[in-house]
Image (spheres, rainbow, N blue to C red):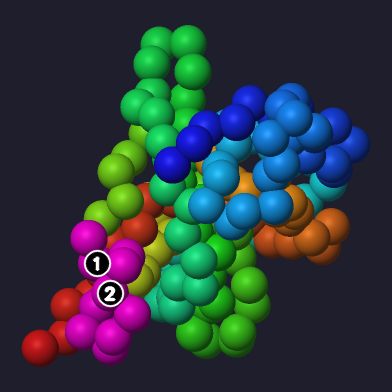
Amino acid sequence: MKLIPVIFYLGIILPVDCALEGCTDEHHVSNTTVILAPYKKVNLDPSIGFIQLKILKIYPAQLDCTAGERYANLYICKRLLNADTIYIFEECEKVPQFAFDSSANHIPIIDPNAILVHYPEKVNIFVPANFKIPNNAKYLFAKLSDISES
């Protein structure tokens, strides 16, 4: 998988070298910094219990976090209760194996008590050059867990 540096400016992802090499391929991912101000942070009431999800797409972090840089996995998910689409950022974690299991054997969940209270203003993710988060997107920072059903 080839990493392509990009700049995210005013909601537009600008690949640095796509003009030279072409970046229409879904398999080419770029380290992209997303400014979160245009999007809506999801506020969840901890009294509702675990939030069950269906993962639609995973964009894993391609680099490990360092003292100076943090990278996040991006999960595009549907909330099972109300079918809301939520963009979930999970910083400095490896994608858990259950996240790739699309069967009903593992149901991804978020514990509302484990959601970050203070969010960063921006996040570094690895996505294709043509990737765009919709203007009305809802997001949160959380660590995914799962309910194993056997």
Magenta residues (range)? 97-107
Tell me the quarter of the picture where residue 40 sits: bottom right
Instruction: State left or right for residue 17 relative to residue 45.
Output: right
Residue 48 percent across, percent down from the top left? 46, 74
Per the image, is 145 magenta?
no
**Residue 98, which numbered label?**
1
Q: Residue at x 63, y 26 (%)?
A: 5
Tell me the quarter of the picture where residue 110 sits: bottom left
Q: Is residue 48 visible?
A: no
- Alpha-carbon distance for marks 1 and 2? 5 Å
Tell me if label 1 and label 2 are in contact, CB under 8 Å.
yes
Q: Residue at x 84, y 57 (%)?
A: 135
Residue placed furthest toward the top: 68
The C terminus, quarter of image? bottom left
Residue 119 percent across, percent down from the top left? 59, 36
Tell me the quarter of the picture where residue 10 sits: top right
* Placement of 59 over or under 54, stated as above or below: above
Foreground pick, 108 / 127: 127
Dot 1: few (<14), some (14–19), or many (≥20) neighbours within 10 Å?
some
